[in-house]
Amino acid sequence: MPQNTGERQSVLLNGLFEEAHMAEPPSPLWEVFIRPRNGLAHRHVGSLHAHDAEMALQAARDVYTRRGETLSIWVVPSSAVIASDPGEKDMMFEPTATKIYRHPTFYEVPDEVGHM
Amino acid sequence: MQPFSDPRAAWLARLGDATLILGHRLSEWLSRAPTLEEDIAMANLSLDLIGQTRAFYVRACELEGAGDETTLAFRRAEPDYRNPLLVEQPNGNFADTIARHLLFSAYAAPLYERLAASNDVETPGIATRSSREMAYHLRHAGEWMIRLGDGTAESRDKAQAALDDLWPYVPELFEADDLDREVAASGFGVDPSTLRDDFDAAIDETIARATLRKPAEGRGQRGGKSGQHSEYLGHILASMQFLQRAYPDARW
């Protein structure tokens, strides 16, 4: 039996929290990509929970585009993302660090090319 | 500063009263919404409505040649507010709030669309901007209603109960009074009785997709548009007006 009010409250809150979570299964996670007005490509901006694609799109609009910077939104189920294994990062990415000749720094890019 | 001497000002202020009270009601959800995402969504909807209020009030004061939006929002007495009873109804559960918002949006979206043809110089701009906002409100509330109605047995019961409880406040939205008719006849405003078909089309489609039942329409509850309110408005004003009453002209 909890002694003080604080403990009693935290037990009560934990109970409410568990109850809320038991009553409702967690909704799926979605990754959000937005294309800004001045940008070229969709960019990952974060993630959110929603029950289905339409509600994910609306939530993305409400959570990530509040300041009028957006032209287009993509939402993708997080479960559809195939990720590289962090344990393999040495094999996957380390070899490129020593290959400076792959960086396009050895020639001038003409201004007329624009974005590269 | 009530009553307004200019009917156009009185009519625009009435639109502002509706969006102010509904915007305040939605703001009561902040930090209490079912999910973080919906909490932010409700804040956006609330701020849209309060922004519309400000635009309507500012234009009303210009037409009247007196007053300011802060006075209209925070320093009037209960009978001076002319919002329909629907918007002052309590938030209830999430389905109650969504149903209330669906009904209001299905009324306000076509209202603002028509108001974009007003013969005023400023009002069409306000109406066009606001109608885009209300089109999103209608979609957001509609999609939630479909999911609640066609969801679990519990969400379906709550969604149907919310529609049934709020339907008595629908007729008032579309009943034209002398002021409505006067501003409509002059080409400034919109007669709300001409909006009912658009409302029914939007609501019927949503209710069908939500597999819910459209409530039978009785005589309905009315009075807000003429300043006779339900017991809820006084409590809203007490919390909304407290700061300006206690610290007049307080600024950030």
Image (tube, coloured by chain):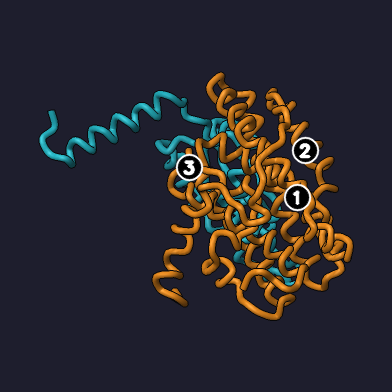
Quadrant containing the C terminus of chain B in the rendered view: bottom left
Q: Dot 2: few (<14), some (14–19), or many (≥20) neighbours within 10 Å?
A: some
**Residue A35, percent across and down?**
66, 53
Q: Which mark is residue B109?
A: 1
| Chain displayed in orange | B
Colour chosen for chain A: cyan
User: According to the image, label 3 marks what residue?
Assistant: B33
Return the disc, 1 or 3, that comes first in the chain's sequence. 3
Amino acid carrying label 2: it is: Ala
Secondary structure beneath label 2 = helix
The image shows residue B181, relative to residue B156, as above or below, that is below
Q: Please, which chain is the residue tagged with disc 1 on?
A: B
Q: Residue at x 66, y 79 (%)?
A: B66
Which numbered circle lies on residue A36? none
Comparing labels 1 and 3, the label whose residue is closer to the camera = 1
Identify the residue at image location x=59%, y=28%.
Answer: B161
